[in-house]
Amino acid sequence: MTALLELRAVSKTYGAGPAAVCALDTVTLSVAAGEMVAVMGPSGSGKSTLLTIAGSLEEATTGEVIIEGTPLSGLSRNDRARLRRRHIGYVFQDFNLLAGLTAVENITMPLELDGMKAKHARRIGLDALTELGLADRADTFPDELSGGMRQRVAIARALVGNRRLLLADEPTGALDSHTGESVMRLIRTACRAGAAAVVVTHDAQLASWADRVVFVRDGAIIDSTEPLPGPESLLASGGEAGR
Protein backbone atom coordinates (compact mmCIF):
# COMPACT_ATOMS: atom_id res chain seq x y z
CA MET A 1 0.00 0.00 0.00
CA THR A 2 1.07 3.59 -0.63
CA ALA A 3 2.52 5.37 2.41
CA LEU A 4 0.74 8.66 3.09
CA LEU A 5 2.97 9.46 6.06
CA GLU A 6 6.60 8.56 6.59
CA LEU A 7 8.86 9.52 9.48
CA ARG A 8 12.47 8.61 8.72
CA ALA A 9 14.83 8.57 11.72
CA VAL A 10 13.09 11.62 13.18
CA SER A 11 14.48 13.14 16.38
CA LYS A 12 13.34 16.21 18.28
CA THR A 13 15.42 17.91 20.96
CA TYR A 14 14.31 20.92 22.96
CA GLY A 15 16.97 23.18 24.43
CA ALA A 16 20.72 22.72 24.31
CA GLY A 17 23.62 21.56 26.45
CA PRO A 18 22.91 20.04 29.88
CA ALA A 19 19.31 21.31 29.76
CA ALA A 20 18.53 19.58 26.44
CA VAL A 21 15.51 17.26 26.42
CA CYS A 22 15.14 14.56 23.77
CA ALA A 23 11.40 14.28 23.02
CA LEU A 24 11.79 11.94 20.04
CA ASP A 25 14.73 9.62 19.38
CA THR A 26 15.26 8.44 15.77
CA VAL A 27 11.63 7.46 15.22
CA THR A 28 10.83 5.68 11.97
CA LEU A 29 7.17 5.11 11.12
CA SER A 30 5.18 4.56 7.94
CA VAL A 31 1.38 4.80 7.71
CA ALA A 32 -0.34 3.60 4.56
CA ALA A 33 -3.46 4.85 2.84
CA GLY A 34 -6.44 3.14 4.45
CA GLU A 35 -4.58 2.40 7.69
CA MET A 36 -5.29 3.55 11.23
CA VAL A 37 -2.36 3.46 13.65
CA ALA A 38 -2.83 3.93 17.40
CA VAL A 39 0.07 5.36 19.40
CA MET A 40 0.23 4.40 23.07
CA GLY A 41 2.69 5.10 25.87
CA PRO A 42 3.05 6.73 29.28
CA SER A 43 2.67 10.46 29.86
CA GLY A 44 5.72 12.34 28.60
CA SER A 45 6.81 9.56 26.27
CA GLY A 46 6.72 11.74 23.13
CA LYS A 47 3.33 10.80 21.69
CA SER A 48 2.05 14.35 21.19
CA THR A 49 5.41 15.53 19.84
CA LEU A 50 5.26 12.74 17.27
CA LEU A 51 1.88 14.06 16.10
CA THR A 52 2.90 17.71 15.86
CA ILE A 53 6.01 16.84 13.85
CA ALA A 54 4.08 14.42 11.63
CA GLY A 55 1.67 17.25 10.85
CA SER A 56 4.38 19.86 10.22
CA LEU A 57 3.40 22.00 13.21
CA GLU A 58 6.94 21.56 14.51
CA GLU A 59 10.17 20.83 12.67
CA ALA A 60 12.27 17.78 13.44
CA THR A 61 15.76 18.39 14.79
CA THR A 62 17.04 15.60 12.55
CA GLY A 63 15.43 13.17 10.13
CA GLU A 64 12.75 13.65 7.49
CA VAL A 65 8.96 13.76 7.39
CA ILE A 66 7.29 12.86 4.09
CA ILE A 67 3.57 13.40 3.41
CA GLU A 68 2.09 11.93 0.23
CA GLY A 69 5.59 11.66 -1.23
CA THR A 70 6.55 15.27 -0.45
CA PRO A 71 9.48 15.85 1.97
CA LEU A 72 8.55 18.66 4.35
CA SER A 73 12.13 19.88 4.52
CA GLY A 74 11.83 21.15 0.95
CA LEU A 75 8.74 23.28 1.54
CA SER A 76 8.52 26.95 2.41
CA ARG A 77 6.50 28.05 5.44
CA ASN A 78 3.59 29.07 3.18
CA ASP A 79 3.67 25.76 1.33
CA ARG A 80 3.61 23.88 4.62
CA ALA A 81 0.60 25.89 5.78
CA ARG A 82 -1.18 25.14 2.51
CA LEU A 83 -0.40 21.42 2.83
CA ARG A 84 -1.74 21.36 6.39
CA ARG A 85 -4.96 23.13 5.43
CA ARG A 86 -5.69 20.94 2.43
CA HIS A 87 -4.38 17.52 3.38
CA ILE A 88 -4.23 17.18 7.17
CA GLY A 89 -7.06 17.01 9.68
CA TYR A 90 -6.15 17.56 13.34
CA VAL A 91 -7.92 16.85 16.59
CA PHE A 92 -6.04 18.61 19.42
CA GLN A 93 -6.44 17.96 23.13
CA ASP A 94 -7.35 21.64 23.68
CA PHE A 95 -9.68 21.71 20.61
CA ASN A 96 -8.22 24.95 19.09
CA LEU A 97 -11.64 26.28 18.13
CA LEU A 98 -12.00 29.98 17.22
CA ALA A 99 -14.17 31.66 19.87
CA GLY A 100 -15.60 34.23 17.43
CA LEU A 101 -16.98 31.61 15.03
CA THR A 102 -19.97 29.33 15.50
CA ALA A 103 -19.59 25.56 15.55
CA VAL A 104 -20.40 25.19 11.86
CA GLU A 105 -18.22 28.17 10.93
CA ASN A 106 -15.23 26.59 12.72
CA ILE A 107 -15.75 23.51 10.58
CA THR A 108 -16.28 25.28 7.27
CA MET A 109 -13.60 27.97 7.47
CA PRO A 110 -10.77 25.77 6.05
CA LEU A 111 -13.05 24.71 3.18
CA GLU A 112 -13.90 28.29 2.33
CA LEU A 113 -10.24 29.34 2.51
CA ASP A 114 -9.61 26.81 -0.23
CA GLY A 115 -12.29 28.35 -2.43
CA MET A 116 -15.40 26.31 -1.63
CA LYS A 117 -18.63 28.33 -1.81
CA ALA A 118 -20.07 29.16 1.61
CA LYS A 119 -23.41 27.44 0.99
CA HIS A 120 -21.77 24.17 -0.08
CA ALA A 121 -19.30 24.33 2.82
CA ARG A 122 -22.13 24.88 5.32
CA ARG A 123 -24.00 21.86 4.00
CA ILE A 124 -20.89 19.70 4.49
CA GLY A 125 -20.38 21.14 7.98
CA LEU A 126 -23.98 20.46 8.96
CA ASP A 127 -23.72 16.87 7.73
CA ALA A 128 -20.61 16.35 9.88
CA LEU A 129 -22.31 17.82 12.95
CA THR A 130 -25.36 15.64 12.36
CA GLU A 131 -23.15 12.53 12.34
CA LEU A 132 -21.89 13.53 15.79
CA GLY A 133 -25.27 14.49 17.24
CA LEU A 134 -24.73 18.27 17.19
CA ALA A 135 -26.96 19.46 14.35
CA ASP A 136 -28.97 21.62 16.79
CA ARG A 137 -25.79 23.39 17.97
CA ALA A 138 -24.51 24.42 14.54
CA ASP A 139 -24.93 28.15 15.18
CA THR A 140 -23.70 28.04 18.79
CA PHE A 141 -20.37 29.60 19.81
CA PRO A 142 -17.67 27.40 21.43
CA ASP A 143 -17.90 29.04 24.87
CA GLU A 144 -21.60 28.08 24.96
CA LEU A 145 -20.76 24.39 24.44
CA SER A 146 -19.67 21.77 26.95
CA GLY A 147 -16.17 20.28 26.72
CA GLY A 148 -17.51 17.15 25.07
CA MET A 149 -19.44 19.17 22.52
CA ARG A 150 -16.38 21.29 21.67
CA GLN A 151 -14.41 18.10 21.18
CA ARG A 152 -17.01 16.80 18.74
CA VAL A 153 -16.87 20.07 16.78
CA ALA A 154 -13.07 19.74 16.60
CA ILE A 155 -13.44 16.18 15.32
CA ALA A 156 -15.97 17.25 12.70
CA ARG A 157 -13.58 19.99 11.53
CA ALA A 158 -10.79 17.42 11.12
CA LEU A 159 -12.93 15.03 9.12
CA VAL A 160 -14.57 17.34 6.56
CA GLY A 161 -13.21 17.84 3.07
CA ASN A 162 -10.85 15.49 1.30
CA ARG A 163 -8.08 15.46 3.88
CA ARG A 164 -5.96 12.37 3.46
CA LEU A 165 -4.10 12.38 6.78
CA LEU A 166 -5.93 12.47 10.13
CA LEU A 167 -3.96 13.16 13.31
CA ALA A 168 -5.84 12.88 16.61
CA ASP A 169 -4.55 13.44 20.15
CA GLU A 170 -6.88 11.65 22.60
CA PRO A 171 -9.93 12.32 20.37
CA THR A 172 -12.47 10.69 22.70
CA GLY A 173 -11.06 11.87 26.04
CA ALA A 174 -14.07 14.06 26.95
CA LEU A 175 -16.74 11.87 25.35
CA ASP A 176 -19.03 9.14 26.65
CA SER A 177 -18.53 5.62 25.28
CA HIS A 178 -21.39 5.84 22.77
CA THR A 179 -20.17 9.11 21.25
CA GLY A 180 -16.60 7.79 21.35
CA GLU A 181 -17.69 4.85 19.21
CA SER A 182 -19.31 7.23 16.73
CA VAL A 183 -16.04 9.17 16.47
CA MET A 184 -13.98 6.05 15.85
CA ARG A 185 -16.50 4.83 13.28
CA LEU A 186 -16.13 8.14 11.39
CA ILE A 187 -12.34 7.85 11.41
CA ARG A 188 -12.57 4.25 10.18
CA THR A 189 -14.92 5.38 7.40
CA ALA A 190 -12.36 8.00 6.33
CA CYS A 191 -9.66 5.32 6.28
CA ARG A 192 -11.78 3.00 4.17
CA ALA A 193 -12.11 5.89 1.71
CA GLY A 194 -8.32 6.09 1.44
CA ALA A 195 -7.18 8.31 4.31
CA ALA A 196 -4.49 7.43 6.83
CA ALA A 197 -4.98 8.08 10.55
CA VAL A 198 -2.67 8.31 13.55
CA VAL A 199 -4.49 8.35 16.89
CA VAL A 200 -2.71 8.99 20.20
CA THR A 201 -4.53 7.31 23.07
CA HIS A 202 -4.11 5.74 26.49
CA ASP A 203 -7.34 3.75 26.06
CA ALA A 204 -6.89 0.12 25.00
CA GLN A 205 -10.55 -0.06 23.92
CA LEU A 206 -10.04 2.86 21.53
CA ALA A 207 -6.77 1.33 20.28
CA SER A 208 -8.67 -1.83 19.36
CA TRP A 209 -10.18 0.08 16.42
CA ALA A 210 -6.72 0.48 14.87
CA ASP A 211 -4.98 -1.76 12.35
CA ARG A 212 -1.73 -1.44 14.29
CA VAL A 213 -0.66 -0.24 17.73
CA VAL A 214 2.71 1.48 18.18
CA PHE A 215 4.16 1.75 21.69
CA VAL A 216 6.35 4.75 22.56
CA ARG A 217 8.57 5.17 25.62
CA ASP A 218 11.21 7.85 26.29
CA GLY A 219 10.77 9.21 22.77
CA ALA A 220 11.43 5.91 20.98
CA ILE A 221 9.18 3.28 19.43
CA ILE A 222 9.71 0.15 21.52
CA ASP A 223 7.12 -2.15 19.94
CA SER A 224 4.49 -2.38 17.22
CA THR A 225 1.72 -4.94 17.12
CA GLU A 226 -1.77 -5.69 15.89
CA PRO A 227 -4.44 -5.14 18.56
CA LEU A 228 -6.77 -7.80 19.90
CA PRO A 229 -10.05 -8.14 17.94
CA GLY A 230 -12.21 -5.14 18.75
CA PRO A 231 -15.17 -3.10 17.48
CA GLU A 232 -13.87 -2.80 13.92
CA SER A 233 -13.50 -6.55 13.51
CA LEU A 234 -17.01 -7.00 14.89
CA LEU A 235 -18.27 -4.47 12.34
CA ALA A 236 -16.64 -6.43 9.53
CA SER A 237 -18.15 -9.69 10.73
CA GLY A 238 -21.63 -8.25 11.23
CA GLY A 239 -21.46 -8.40 15.03
CA GLU A 240 -23.18 -6.22 17.59
CA ALA A 241 -20.97 -3.19 16.94
CA GLY A 242 -22.25 -3.04 13.40
CA ARG A 243 -25.89 -3.02 14.33
Image (cartoon, rainbow, N blue to C red):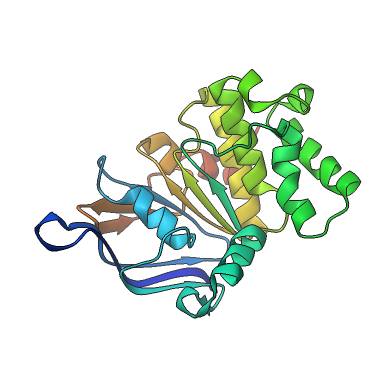
Q: Left or right: 242 with respect to 46?
A: right
229 up-or-down from 75: above or below: above
Closer-to-camera residue (92/207): 92
**Residue 197 percent coordinates (x, y):** 52, 55
Q: Left or right: 211 with respect to 112?
A: left
Name the residue: 54% across, 36% down: 95
Residue lying farthest to the bottom in this orientation: 74
Can the viewer see residue 1?
Answer: no
Residue 165: image quadrant is: bottom right
**Residue 115 percent coordinates (x, y):** 82, 59
53 up-or-down from 70: above or below: above
Can the viewer see residue 144?
Answer: yes
Q: Left or right: 74 with respect to 104?
A: left
Closer-to-camera residue (229/211): 211
174 up-or-down from 154: above or below: above
Residue lying farthest to the left in this orientation: 18
Closer-to-camera residue (11/101): 101
Q: Quadrant of the C terminus?
A: top right
178 up-or-down from 53: above or below: above
Name the residue: 71% across, 32% down: 103
**Residue 158 percent coordinates (x, y):** 62, 47
**Residue 185 percent coordinates (x, y):** 60, 41
Name the residue: 49% across, 42% down: 92
Q: Left or right: 238 with respect to 30?
A: right
